[in-house]
Amino acid sequence: MNYELREMIPGDEPRVLEIFRQGIDSGMATFETEVPTAEAWDMEYFNTCRWVLENENNEVVGWCALKPVSKRECFKGVAEVSIYFDNDYQGKGLGSVLLKKLILDSEDHGFWTLQTNIFADNEASVKFHQKNGFRIVGVRKKLGKLNGEWKDVIMFEKRSGMM
């Protein structure tokens, strides 16, 4: 199967949000419980460093983007990674293609630290981020509740080799 990696465009929002909904429904990817509007999603993420992976039918099967961790000037080079795949395309080794592109693009845009927070029980995502050069910063016990259940979160970071 052939895939195309390309920058996200405004017409991708419906599919991006559908894939995000799958992540919400899994209970393993986010504390979010509702899919945002396209406008709300767009405002939450940086306008740069947005990528999608398409299958041979030109259908978006995965996406990644960065969002700010703070509005403070001193943290302008620190961003949180979001990466999601359609359920039918998870576990096929495609995530590394997206994440590696995101890492390179983030460095081109002056980011010096990427971080992400993974549910401790999401072993696949933990291994994936470690395989792609992220290191564990710490574990935040009972950080928040999802569907009435406390969730521990592992915080990862990847420092740019360019800075």
Image (tube, helix red, strand yellow):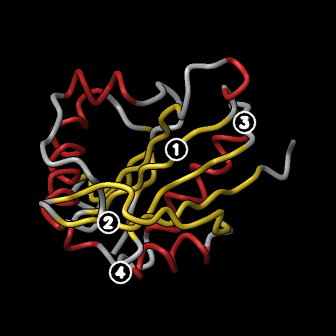
Nearer to us of marks 4 and 1 is 1
Contact flag, marks 2 and 1 (Cβ < 8 Å): no
The residue at the point 47 percent across, 35 percent down is: 67
The residue at the point 75 percent across, 52 percent down is: 159
Rate crowding at label 3 as few (under 14), some (14 to 19) or many (20 or more) other CA atoms within 10 Å: few
For the residue pair 38 and 98, the one nearer the viewer reads as 38
Q: Which residue is mark 1?
A: 80
State which quadrant residue 89 falls in.
bottom left
Amino acid type, label 4: Gly
Residue 120 in the image: state x and y as whole percent: 41, 74
Which numbered disc, 4 or 2, marks the residue that appears first in the sequence?
4
Say which element carries label 4: loop
Identify the image quadrant of the N terminus. Answer: bottom left
Say which element carries label 3: helix
Which numbered disc, 3 or 2, marks the residue that appears first in the sequence?
3
For the residue pair 141 and 38, the one nearer the viewer reads as 141
State which quadrant residue 125 falls in.
bottom left
The residue at the point 18 percent across, 56 percent down is: 24
Residue 124 in the image: state x and y as whole percent: 41, 80
Rate crowding at label 1 as few (under 14), some (14 to 19) or many (20 or more) other CA atoms within 10 Å: some
Q: Is residue 144 above or below residue 46?
A: below
Which numbered disc, 2 or 1, marks the residue that appears first in the sequence?
1
Report the disc number at residue 151: 2
